[in-house]
Image: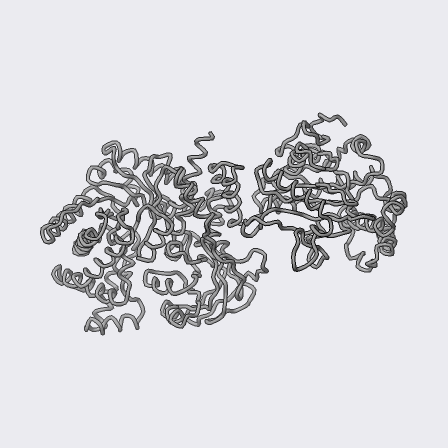
Amino acid sequence: MQQDDPNITLITPTAPMAAQTHGGRAKCLQRLVRLDLPVPRTIALSFDAVHGIAAGDMPDLEALIAPFSAEALLCVRPSSEDPDWGGPGAVLNIGMNDAKFVELSDRLGKEAASELYLRFVQAYSTHVARLDPDIFDDVDSDPVVGLGQALHAYENETEEDFPQETSVQLAEVLRSMARAWEGTTARLLRQAKGAPADAGLGLVVQEMAFGLGQGESGSGVMQLVDSATGARRITGRYMSQSQGRDALRAGSDAMFLMRDPRGPSLEEVAPEAFAKLRGYTELMRVKLREEMQVEFTIENGEVYVLDGVRVARNARAAVAIAVTLADDGIISREEALMRIEPRALNELLHRQVDPEAPRDVLARGVAASPGAATGKIVFTAEAAQAHAARDEPCVLVRRETSPEDIRGMHAAVAVLTERGGMTSHAAVIGRGIGLPCVVGASEIGFDTSRKTLTLRDGRVLRKGDTITIDGTNGEVLAGAAPLLEAARDESFQTLMEWADAVRDIAVRANADTPADAEAARNFRAQGIGLCRTEHMFFEADRLTVMREMIFADSSRDRAAALDRLLPMQRADFIDLFRIMQGQPVCIRLFDPPLHEFLPTDRSGLLELAEALDLPLSDVTRRVEALGEYNPMLGMRGVRLGITVPEIYDMQARAIFEATVEASREGDAVVPEIMIPLVSARREVELVKTRVDAVAAAVRNETGRDFTYRLGVMVETPRAALRANEIAPHVSFLSFGTNDLTQMTYGLSRDDAGRFMSTYVKQGVYPEDPFHTLDVDGVGELLRMGAERGRAVKPNLVLSICGEHGGNPESIAFCRAAGFDYVSCSPFRVPVARLAAAQLVVKDKIG
């Protein structure tokens, strides 16, 4: 074997190898060798070499073994490009045979030699000979006795003697590991972890340090941080007279590393070895610029470093580690920002199901809003409010939610729906208020009349049963699953400050209530990019007045009813303006069709008839007359504002009066008024004329001057195509990508979840377009709208206010297209802030 052989390489400081050709473990071992750490002699086999072995092309085994001493035992470990992709299990003590057993019995003692041989026989039998592990169930726990039993069991099963030649043993181990990696099961497992199907595997062949012997011997792992919190403290375990990762086995006799009142420690048993290990780990942290876990062996008091891997970590620990490394000057702040996956911040912002806990998965759906919560099943918004009044956590279960369920959603700890996708009502509101939500759980049989859920395995859940909703993974779990608390700690705040110092696109929040606005402020959103005013009309005292307005026969009667809503709406806006403290607040005028405010069942219609003092037949006819075949494309948005202008008049007055009132106390408020569902210039002209008239009236009545900005929510393809006609009349265009995607594709965003996974799996769409912005189709409309709008009005403000605004990919698109800001749910604001900062850093480093 040549030292410069690119496929079978003795690991030296200058040997030619890379993670992309030999795997991450091999490359890390080379780095440890360069640091002069006590790494046993190691040979790395490249991806090509291992692929050849799987195909039957075995290298020269005698040449491969030659660099090792004659008395050495060997181990083989996998070396995939990314450690998270896994690989076949390590095989230790290769080369152990009858002659070595006699030799090591004299050197280490018969018990230690028996332990080494027994471990190898068992590993070889199960991993290489593919024997059933059950054949060793009766092997004696005493290794001296058990060794003979294990050899006898092997010979009985295979009808041949246990192989004695090191080259034969090594060849069979290499062949077995190579073929296991290329097998169907392994391929599917690594694909599930994000690895490409054809990902390569390297192997490292390393001389064994025994961990067994007369003096202090053993094995363990050490790291300098807590994997759960990222806090700086030495963690790990050490076990005397052991090999590999025995110390981490549950129920082992492992000891602590540092002195600990709970039990013995390596620091007390072998202080010199402990000091060396600590020094090695600190050196690796600085030189490799990462928190590392060291796998080590102590043989007769001598320390050997067998491996170094990146410390496993959750999102909270990842942030703390990155920030600490930057604070210590080991990495730059920009690199710290790049080390955190933006979406991983969801783990910090919401409670999560403990990943180590067992899961009884009842059903799966669309992971619509991250986080996890446990509660009792309820089937109505009223029941949810009753549970909240008793301080009992509950999960609101609906076929699909509507604006009438808003109060119930606020009262519940989580939501589960049978229908819906990423931009359904439940999903959008859930993300907005930080409520865990699983939608589109169509594999569950919903019977809302009997208040039962029938699962695919036949189990039936009833009102009052306890379930856990895991909105991060889209799972419904039985009972109360163990939860981990959210962690918005100092490290998180620091990382966000660094992100804000770098990014060059603003991030606002979609917020409809004072609670939403408070969340937006807490997450440092730069204003509100979308306030959906219709949610303010579903409170019980307002809903009745709203229905009176709908049933009014004349403009005067409608205005009279709306006059009663005016002070309520004004108070809402005053609260929002005060909370945002002078930051921009973009208020979308009334959008939904009127039928959403009317009951559909007989009891609701009867209640409405009593409230309005009208015959039930009249109320029923009026409700039916307001029904539409396709209400999402019917009389809603600006169409309603033009047909029933009194609604927009009232809202404009409420906004301007709130502006005057809020400006008395602090920073001047400059409200932004957004017209929804525009498709023609004339619509904008008509609404603008009335809004300007209301503004003039409020100025005259109050004697106070103020300014406001009028804009359009671009949700129809025609608005994007005719942006050059619309732009001269407005200050901004804000693209509502939820509806724009729906209209561009001709897809119902509430129903697409039923078949979208099939479409994505079969490659019809690369991703769910309601989840990830379609930059080719919908994106083309955004680009055209932006270019045509700015061609006639260069200072036109551009933004996205649909749910895509919180996606890193969408932010990259908006930034490249010259948009001024993105707006997303409050709990997605930190994700957007970090993603925006990473884009700037990527530009810097090319």
In depth, the one of 478 and 526 nearer the eye is 526
x and y, in percent, of residue 90 in the image: 72, 45
Asked whether the viewer can see residue 461, the reply is: yes
In depth, the one of 99 and 436 nearer the eye is 99
* Residue depicted at 30% across the width and 37% down the height: 785
Colour scheme in the image? one colour
Which image quadrant for residue 173? top right
x and y, in percent, of residue 299 in the image: 78, 44
Q: How many marks?
A: 0
Q: Is residue 761 depicted above or below 167 in this figure?
A: below
Q: Quadrant of the N terminus?
A: top right
Q: Is residue 333 depicted above or below 534 in this figure?
A: above
* Residue depicted at 79% across the width and 31% down the height: 67
x and y, in percent, of residue 817 in the image: 35, 35
Q: Is residue 246 left or right of residue 394?
A: right
x and y, in percent, of residue 603 in the image: 30, 73
Q: Is residue 60 depicted above or below 279 in this figure?
A: above
Asked whether the viewer can see residue 529, the reply is: no
